[in-house]
Image (cartoon, rainbow, N blue to C red):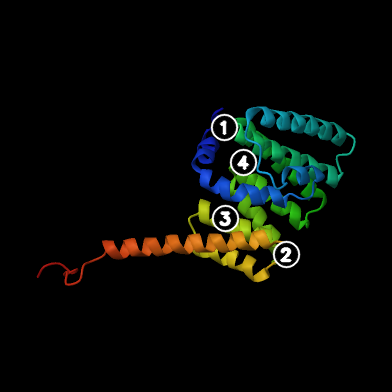
Amino acid sequence: MYRYKGKIKRLKNNKRFIAIVITLAVAALILSSVLAYFISSSPPPRDDETLEYYVRQLEDQAKGYEENLKSAEDNVNLLTRTAETFYQLGFYYSLMSEPEKSISSYEKAVDYYGKALEKEPDNVDIHFLRAVSAYSSGDDGLAEEELKRALELDPKHAWSHYYYGVLLYYSKNNSKEAIAHWEKVVELNPEGEEALVEQAKSLIALAEEEMNKENDTEDEDGPKPGENTAGDE
């Protein structure tokens, strides 16, 4: 319980982040055919009975994958599918308000993506997916490390630019650099990723609006016209 305390607190304090990012992040996990079902046009299920059904299905799937890995531990496809399944479990556990299980599942996703990268260290998509899982688990440092590596391998990886901007904005309060990454997404304008580009534009507008408000507040708090800022003589 105690090892998750700080991470659980952050999860509770990042509702806004989760609402914006999780839909796109899950959509990015297209390596698994299972996820094609979950990212349909319908929103994620919210009623307890449906959530519990999905979780049972995913738990069984995860067990099956882990059993298969005992005899195929070098199978990168199987490693990534296992990681994706645990990521999905983390997502649905969060909807069920089970933060410990959610974080534990995200951490398992991180581990399996890490094992896949041992076999394919230059796989940009796996670096990105590991970053998504790491951030979801509360590990900002690893998430940033993986995003940097992904962009080193492919400076035009739009998803990594998008997500790096999110991390900088919501976790590091660095609006300027975040905007730069989102502007790169708009510049790249990847084919078939119209929703990603539009989301980046929306986040740019949001960040710029908040920066302007902060500047206005600083101006209001500054010295008034005619005031002697050097002190009375």
Which residue carries the number 4 mark? 137
- Distance, label 3 to label 1, CA atoms, is 25 Å
Nearest to the eye among marks 1 and 2: give it. 2
Which three-letter amino acid code belongs to the residue tagged 2?
Answer: Asp
Q: Residue at x 71, y 31 (%)?
A: 55
Query: Residue pushed farthest front?
Result: 42
Which residue carries the number 2 mark? 154
Which residue carries the number 3 mark? 166
20 displayed left or right of 209 = right
Which three-letter amino acid code belongs to the residue tagged 4?
Answer: Ser
User: Badge 4, how many Cα within 10 Å: few under 14, some, many 20+?
Assistant: many
- Distance, label 3 to label 4, CA atoms, is 15 Å
Q: Position of residue 120 (x, y in %)?
A: 81, 53
Q: Is residue 94 above or below residue 163?
A: above
Which three-letter amino acid code belongs to the residue tagged 3?
Answer: Val
Q: Quadrant of the C terminus?
A: bottom left
Which residue carries the number 1 mark? 3
- From the viewer's side, name the closer residue of 187 and 106: 187
